[in-house]
Amino acid sequence: MRSKHFSFPVNPLVGSTVSNIISLWRKYKIDWPYFPKFLLTLFVAGIFEIFNLWEKIWLHQRLKKTRMNEPPVFIIGFWRSGTTLLHNLLCKDPHAAYTTTFQVVFPHSTITQAWWLKKLTNLLLPADRPFDNVSMDMDFPQEDEYGLAAMQSFSFYNIFNFPRDFDKIYKDELFTGNLDSKDLITWKYNFNKLIKKALINTGGIRYISKNPCSLCRIELLLSMYPDAKFIFIYRNPYKVAESLYRFILAIFPGTQLQKIPTDYTREKIVKMYAEIMNRYFISKISIPESQLMEIKMEDFVKDKIGYLEKIYQKFNFPDFEISKTHFENYLSINSNYSRDPYETPAETYDLVNRYAPDIFERFGYEKE
C-alpha cells in the first residue's frame, strides 16, 4: 500500500555517501529533535556504501565510453511554472533520456541495484506529490538537482534539509558559477556523470533536464554544452510566488533536519523570485536565438500538443508524429489531474507588486 504522506523514517540523503552526509553535518547544525532520523540516515547510507562501490567498479569503463549524441535540452522555468508537466511530456519521446526519481535518490546505485531497491522505495514513496497531486513513481522523470544534492555537499536543495540556513544556501549554493574553482570542477564532473548514468538507465540519446536552478547557471551550461537547447516556461508571478511558498512548506516535513525558522516568509520567496528572474533576463542574452524558446504556461496548458510541435520544429527534433502518440497517451491517462485549491492572500499581491513590478511588463501580465 503506497504512503499518502510526505514523511519518511530517514532523510532523502539516505542515497548519498557517508562522507557527503558528514560534510553537510559539519556545515549545518542539526536540531536535536531530528538527530535520531539523521543517525538512521547515516547508518543506512553506510550500508549502501557496499552497493555504491560495486556500481563504481562495474560501471567505470562504460561511463568513460558513454557520450551524448544530441545536445541536451534544459527546461529552465522558475519553480511552480509548469516545468513538471512539460518535462514529463518531453520525456515520453522514445529518444529522451532523463534522471528518474530512483536515480536522483540513489545516484550511486542507479544501475546495479534497481532490480530490488526500486520496488522497496516505491512502497515508501507517496502516491502523489504533496500539495499539487502530481503522481510519483521511482521510474518517473525527476529534477537532476536532487541527484546533485546527493552527490556533493553544495546544492540549493540543501534548503529542504536545513531550512534555518536558507539564506546562506541561497547565496552560496544556488549561483553555481560563484563556487570556488575546486567545487566548480566537482560540480561539472558530477553533473556529467549524472547525465551519463541517465543515458544508460533510460536508453535515450537526448538528455532532457528540468531544473529551475539552471536559471542561475545559463552561462555555465553553455560553456559545457555550447549547442544546448533551452526552454523557458513562465507563469503569472502572483501564482508562482504563492504556490512555491506553500510547496516548500509541504516538502519540509519529509526532509527537514532543522526546525522551520520564523523568517521563512512569503517575502523571502518573492524577493528570491524577483532576483532569479532578473538574473535570467540578463543571462538569456548569451543564448543564441535558435537555441532558446519561451512559452507562457497559461497558453501551453490550453494547447499542449500544439506547443510540443512548435518545440520540435524550433529545435529540429525528428519524428514528432511518432512522439505525438506517446504525448497523447500520457495526457489521456492524466486527464483527471488537479491541484488542491487555495486562495492567494493580499500579502502576496502586495509583495509581488513591490519587488517584481517590471516582470509583469516583460511577461505580458497585468498587475492586480
Image (cartoon, rainbow, N blue to C red):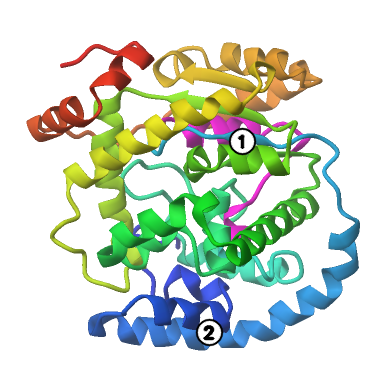
Q: Position of residue 364 (x, y in %)?
A: 34, 11
Q: Which residues fall within the magenta stretch?
A: 81-104
Is the C terminus in the top left, top right, bottom left or bottom right quadrant?
Answer: top left
Would you say residue 335 is visible in this rendering? Answer: no
SS assignment at label 2: helix
Q: Amino acid at mark 2?
A: Val
Between 207 and 284, the one lying in front of the other is 284
Q: Residue at x 76, y 16 (%)?
A: 321
Q: Quarter of the image holding residue 181?
A: bottom right
Mark carried by residue 74: 1
Q: Quarter of the image holding residue 184?
A: bottom right
Q: Position of residue 151 (x, y in %)?
A: 59, 67
Query: From this viewpoint, which residue is outermost toward the left?
Result: 346
Relative to 270, say whether 6 is above or below: below
Whether residue 143 sits left or right of residue 31 in the image: it is right
Relative to 179, say whether 337 is above or below: above
